[in-house]
Image (tube, grey):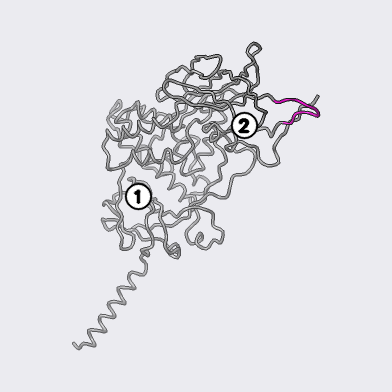
Amino acid sequence: MTRWHLLILTLVATLGGGSARAGAPAASIEPAVARIDAVHGRPLVFRVTLENERDARRPVTIRTDDGTDLEGHLFWISRAGTAEGPDTGWLGPRAPWRAIPGDQARRMDNRPPGSWHIVADMPIGVYGQGIWIGPARHPLAWMPDPHRLGVGTGPGGGQAAGMWAPTVAGDALASPPVVRAIEDLSRDPNERWRARLMTDGLRPAAELTGIAEGAGPVRPFTADDPNDESARALEAIAQVIEARWQVALARLWLIDPDLCTSVRTTAAGVAKFTDGSGHDVWAPAWDPSPLVVEDLLEDLLSPFVDDETRALRARAWLATQPRAVVWVFDDAGRQDALTGDLLPTLGIVSTPRRDAPALVAVEGTSRPNLDPAPPRELRVIGASVPVSDQPAGSARPAQVGVRIGPWRTEVGVLNTMIAARPPGVSAGPLLDDWNLPGWRLGRAFEGALPPAGARTNVLLTR
């Protein structure tokens, strides 16, 4: 064989090899997460970055360590605009989510803010500690089937009943703010786990049944059209997040049931309030910041910590949560006839780690008091502050200290008198009802202001 024959054969082989790799994804697709979690029987879902968005035109070939090829589909996950209207609910404004198929998303001129995700069906029986996207290998952190965790801890060899106890029950589950919250959370793939924790305790199905696992008022995204690829992508994201919480909370229960109960209640519990008619109502009382629970979940699922460290991190997370929520009911609606002090009214909801009553002390007042505060239930208490000699509008609010055990916070109350002169006194705009973000932060303007065109001013005249 001559040198020319060898050269021709080499070129043919090279061209043939390049053609065989034409369907492989470009190396520009990289996971955008520190760890890819894979749950047996659930889809494989993770966030990615694209160096070249032309790669979104076609499915992504993902190969597992055992040689199984998975067909991954790219979606742009974002919120569909912004929530509008005066009634945004206790959880605050919540816009619906969209999963835009990759080829459609890359061609959008005004694409909404969001992130790329890969969604791939993972058949049962796949094994290996990594996946390949093009020439790059990425490690997998396998999670067990949540239904298998804790088997043998309960009567008859099953799971302990408390492992999947819902955080809301009885009259609280039928309270309108709770019903509305469950509906809103069910439409959010990142938050649906809270709705299930409230209603069915995140109990896994007896067998891997996919979207049929959700029970009660929590509806799957595919309920209206099981073949809608966008709805299937949102459902896959919700399922994987729920499975990760199932594994994390089941492991924590096996380590320390009381600690697990405290974490569950803090992450998806409710508090009892009283409406204007004197009837009891319940509403969510957790910290709505997503980073608060995302950090906890990462810690509980980390493959590099043991059970003792998991429990320590859960306790540390609980220690970062406020011991109570304190806000101002009425700055200075009354005045003490003897001392002339103003008598503000405060609302307190105790959020203890364990459901036990506590004593609340109001500091810095001319009338110190000590009041009992039931767990997760509204308690209205009074305080007193001297009248400021500063003109209204220029004086800084008086700080009233509130203490529950070693935990302490301060709230600012207005302590000035407004002089009424002709033609009258204007006040406003009036604030709308509190919502969860504003209530947790103690700031009425945190999303609680009525929308434009619906504000009300008051004029007090003779």
Query: Which is nearer the N-term, disc 2 or disc 1?
Result: 1
Residue 233 is marked as none
Q: Is residue 79 above or below residue 11?
A: above
Q: Nearer the viewer, residue 136 or 209?
A: 136
Q: Give the distance between the C-alpha atoms of the residues marked 2 and 1, in whole angstroms.
A: 40 Å
- Locate residue 264 relative to residue 310 in the image: left or right: right
Give the residue furthest to the left. 1
**What amino acid is labelled 2 in the image?**
Asp
Picture quadrant where residue 298 is located:
top left
Position of residue 161 measured from the top left corner of the image (x, y, whole percent): 36, 27
The residue stretch that appears in magenta: 418-426
| Residue 421 falls within the magenta-colored stretch | yes
Q: Is residue 190 magenta?
A: no
Q: Pointer 2: residues within 10 angstroms few (<14), some, or many (20+)?
A: some
Quarter of the image where the N terminus is located: bottom left
Checking the image for residue 433, the label placed there is 2
> Residue 276: x percent and y percent?
63, 23
Q: Residues within 10 Å of mark 1 (few under 14, many from 20)?
A: few
Query: Would you say 250 lies left or right of 411 here?
Result: left
Secondary structure, mark 1, is loop
Q: Amino acid at mark 1?
A: Ala
Question: What residue sits 37% from the left and 50% below the top?
Answer: 33
Secondary structure that dominates the magenta span: loop
Residue 87: x and y, percent? 63, 37
Q: Which residue is mark 1?
A: 34
139 or 203, which is in the foreground? 139
Residue 347 in percent (x, y) is at 55, 23
